[in-house]
């Protein structure tokens, strides 16, 4: 930064211009319409070259590629020396077209844009450059009054600041008739509050008292909030020392930091045309980046950095090829799930077993499981850096295992089976920790509560039980035949399918208050899945559709009778003959932002849709039997697993 | 095969004789006066837990009809058929409805004429 200001090479040799140009490009300045011609045509061309290639990506995209600006404007900063100042002044009158709006679509207000650039420069530390820009363009970053006002606030001259505030208010009242007077009052209040607190800090009790009584008092007359605030401020008199004061009021002192904070607060109250909102240009650029990210249909990366120079578009981020096939099971695999750490995978099968697999580096080729494993069961392609190897085979159920669930800390595993039992296993050594035998019919599903100590199970015997890990039964609900249930991550709600007349309803139980709410679906529901943030619910229906519901709480908690869930999207499989599915198919959210919906299907393929747009993105063949369940790796967004009737599990 | 998803019907329901999976509700019964190759048959409005076979043209006592066989989802036995299309106008009322053979189903009631496991007809 310092090098920038001091490189006063008049007429600029090329290499002193290069770094300048680089810095310009990194700031994405689109050129303004005013043309300021530099006497040095050499640097002129070079700079124009760089400008051409480093135009703001958003606008470049709109132009469809090559930018042909009729007037390439040289920034006063491109030279950073006195020469340009005179240039700027002399060529002010040469502004060729005085357009009020610029940009490829003419949406950008020129004056505002220049002010934002000045603010950005100012924020980045180039105050002098910002000033030069102001002079050259004739556009002020902020009116003098405001600049004075900010200066007074920073210096702590509260009386002057208040005066200026009045002046500002009056002078702009005609221009901004919609500026509410209450905000000017709030501004006064804030300034006086700061004055008061600083007085207290200095232990100038008289001054503080005076401020409180004479100045703050009248402001609090008609406003309850303010009166309360005033009373609270009065209590601060009891503070014995400055550190006590800091603690009690959560105020950081009278240093520059606090005054800057005050300035930000005041800026929020003043209309934005007067006093520019902080970091506005950066805010706008980030908005653009987020918009690009939202548009990127295949976005699936955990990398947060996005380049400004190019519109963001992901390619090849979704796994499309099978990287591993695991054949250890001897019968249909009905359910599988990754552990929360993404390192382990558990699968439950019709062969009465649960198998736990572990991701291990490829060099450990012949890793065998510890407990009762028959053969490696891994078929790796050797190019992946990790392979899943069988860690445990958990025997103990006497009938098919329908569901497996990892505890939040991944130390325990639950398995639910058609033999009416729920078993709790220890992951480290594969022992059975507990067996829960209250259900009188097949147990179809279970869900952990986020504390890791309790979990809920449901089955065909129309009961839902809540248990703890030591074997105690805590609660019981009566419901219909439960096909599936989930618990929201905040532990407030239990969502279950209700075997009502035709198993088309979903019941949301409020775990704290005990109330229930029912959502009706159009067809019978086979399975449920909830997103990691608990806001979306994926419902698989027997009619071969998947419905996405938004079950987040509305801002105002509506009475329990109001249905607060909304169906957002319907996803359909393609090309299936049977309109009535015969099997329980599970689906899940996928991708780094859970923006994809992945599901298995009776036609042996894995379907991937885009969650926001509903488009079917990929159909992945490979299995030779119905794909019963899919699970996306929570820590590695490029890996997912699928379980199928062909006795195999595939990793993609 | 996957974990079978089988609906469970509330109330009086007819089930598959061999695998006991629920097939139809008693209140969906339209008529008991049908006959199939193995004996009597009932006409139902709605049947669950079944899948349909391919379409066939069959000549019946009442005329030529296009039907598809109905198979139980759990045990894959043919339990009846569904009328897809009827040629004669007075047979059109049957279209879309299901026939379940009496020999293939058992009802859930325990009538005074015998237990629900009996093979004889019970009214």
Image (cartoon, coloured by chain):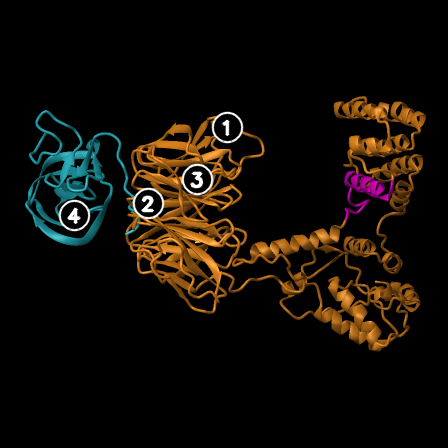
Chain colours: A orange, B cyan
Quadrant containing the N terminus of chain A in the rendered view: bottom right
> Which numbered mark, 3 or 2, is in the foreground of this view?
2
Few, some or many C-alpha atoms within 10 Å of disc 2 (few <14, some 14-19, many ≥20)? some
- Give the residue displayed 90% in from the left and 27% down from the top: A208
> Which numbered mark, 3 or 1, is in the foreground of this view?
3
Q: Are marks 3 and 2 in contact (CB under 8 Å)?
A: no
Few, some or many C-alpha atoms within 10 Å of disc 1 (few <14, some 14-19, many ≥20)? few
Where does residue A261 sit, x and y in percent of width and height? Answer: 80, 41
Residue A322 visible to an observer of this rendering = no
State which region is magenta.
A255-278
Residue that badge 1 annotates: A512
Between residue A5 and residue A267, name the one nearer to us.
A5
Alpha carbon separation for disc pair 2 and 4: 32 Å
Quadrant containing the C terminus of chain A in the rendered view: bottom left
Alpha carbon separation for disc pair 4 and 1: 48 Å
Alpha carbon separation for disc pair 3 and 1: 17 Å
- Give the residue displayed 27% in from the left and 42% down from the top: B6
Between residue A524 and residue A352, name the one nearer to us.
A352
Q: Are marks 3 and 4 in contact (CB under 8 Å)?
A: no
> Which numbered mark, 4 or 1, is in the foreground of this view?
1
Residue that badge 4 annotates: B77
Using the rendered image, report if marks 2 and 1 lie on a common chain. yes
Helix, strand or loop for disc 4: loop
Residue that badge 2 annotates: A396
Q: Which of the two discs, 3 and 2, labels the residue nearer the N terminus?
A: 2
> Which numbered mark, 2 or 4, is in the foreground of this view?
2
Helix, strand or loop for disc 2: loop
Q: Which of the two discs, 2 and 1, labels the residue nearer the N terminus?
A: 2
**Letter of the chain that mark 4 sits on in the rendering:** B
């Amino acid at each position: 930064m310092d090098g920038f200001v001091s490189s006063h090479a008049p007429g600029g040799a090329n290499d002193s211009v290069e770094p300048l140009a680089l810095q310009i490009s990194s700031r994405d300045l689109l050129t303004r319409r005013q043309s300021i011609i530099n006497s040095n045509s050499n640097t002129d061309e070079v700079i124009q070259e760089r400008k051409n290639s480093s135009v703001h990506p958003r606008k470049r995209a709109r132009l469809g590629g090559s930018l042909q600006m009729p007037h390439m404007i040289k920034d006063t900063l491109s030279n950073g020396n006195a020469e340009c100042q005179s240039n700027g002044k002399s060529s002010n009158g040469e502004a060729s077209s005085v357009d009020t709006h610029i940009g490829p679509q003419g949406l950008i207000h020129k004056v505002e844009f220049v002010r934002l650039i000045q603010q950005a420069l100012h924020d980045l530390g180039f105050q002098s450059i910002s000033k030069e820009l102001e002079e050259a363009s004739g556009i002020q970053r902020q009116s003098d009054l405001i600049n004075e006002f900010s200066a007074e606030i920073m210096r702590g001259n509260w009386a002057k600041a208040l005066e200026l505030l009045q002046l500002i208010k009056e002078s702009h009242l005609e221009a901004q008739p919609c500026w509410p007077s209450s905000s000017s009052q709030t501004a006064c209040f804030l300034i006086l509050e700061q004055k008061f607190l600083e007085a207290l800090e200095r232990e100038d009790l008289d001054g503080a008292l005076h401020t409180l009584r004479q100045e703050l008092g009248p402001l609090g007359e008609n406003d309850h909030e303010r009166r309360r605030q005033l009373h609270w401020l009065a209590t601060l008199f009891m503070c014995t020392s400055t550190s006590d004061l800091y603690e009690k009021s959560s105020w950081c002192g009278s240093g520059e930091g606090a005054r800057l904070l005050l300035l930000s607060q005041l800026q929020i109250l003043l209309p934005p045309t007067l006093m520019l909102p902080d970091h506005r240009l950066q805010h706008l650029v980030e908005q653009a980046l987020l918009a690009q990210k939202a548009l990127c249909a295949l976005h699936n990366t955990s990398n947060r950095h996005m380049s400004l120079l190019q519109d963001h578009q992901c390619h090849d981020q979704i796994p499309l090829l099978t990287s591993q096939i695991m054949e250890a099971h001897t019968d249909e695999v009905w359910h599988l799930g990754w552990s929360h750490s993404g390192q382990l995978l558990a699968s439950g099968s019709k062969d009465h077993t649960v198998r736990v697999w572990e991701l291990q580096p490829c060099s450990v080729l012949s890793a065998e499981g510890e407990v009762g494993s028959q053969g490696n069961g891994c078929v790796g392609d050797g190019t992946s850096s990790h392979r899943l190897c069988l860690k445990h085979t958990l025997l103990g159920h006497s009938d098919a295992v329908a569901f497996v669930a990892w505890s939040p800390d991944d130390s325990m595993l639950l398995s639910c089976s058609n033999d009416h039992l729920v078993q709790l296993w220890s992951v480290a050594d594969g022992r059975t920790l507990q067996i829960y035998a209250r259900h009188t019919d097949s147990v179809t599903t279970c869900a952990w509560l986020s504390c890791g100590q309790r979990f809920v199970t449901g089955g065909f015997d129309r009961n839902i039980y809540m248990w703890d890990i030591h074997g105690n039964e805590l609660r019981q609900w009566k419901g219909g035949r439960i096909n599936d249930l989930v618990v929201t991550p905040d532990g407030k709600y239990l969502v279950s399918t209700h075997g009502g007349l035709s198993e088309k309803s979903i019941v949301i139980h409020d775990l704290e208050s005990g109330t229930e709410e029912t959502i009706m679906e159009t067809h019978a529901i086979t399975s449920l899945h909830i997103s990691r943030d608990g806001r979306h619910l994926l419902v698989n229906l027997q009619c071969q559709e998947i419905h996405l519901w938004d079950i987040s709480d509305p801002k105002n908690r509506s009475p329990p009778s109001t249905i607060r869930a909304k169906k957002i999207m319907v996803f359909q499989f393609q090309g299936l003959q049977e309109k009535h599915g015969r099997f329980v198919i599970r689906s899940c959210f996928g991708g780094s932002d859970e923006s994809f919906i992945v599901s298995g299907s009776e036609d042996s393929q894995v379907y991937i849709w885009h969650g926001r747009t509903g488009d079917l993105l990929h159909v992945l063949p490979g299995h030779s039997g119905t794909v019963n369940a899919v699970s996306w790796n929570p820590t590695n967004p490029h890996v997912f697993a699928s379980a199928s009737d062909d006795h195999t599990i595939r990793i993609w | 095969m996957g974990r079978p998803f089988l609906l469970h019907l509330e109330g009086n329901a007819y089930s598959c004789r061999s695998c006991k999976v629920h097939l139809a509700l008693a209140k969906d019964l339209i008529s008991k006066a049908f006959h199939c190759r193995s004996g009597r048959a009932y006409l139902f409005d709605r049947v669950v837990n079944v899948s349909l076979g391919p379409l066939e043209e069959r000549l019946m006592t009442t005329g030529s009809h296009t039907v598809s066989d109905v198979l139980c989802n759990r045990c894959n036995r043919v339990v009846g058929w569904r009328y897809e299309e009827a040629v004669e106008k007075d047979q059109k009322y049957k279209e879309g409805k299901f026939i379940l053979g009496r020999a293939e189903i058992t009802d859930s009631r325990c009538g005074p004429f015998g237990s629900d496991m009996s093979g004889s007809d019970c009214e």
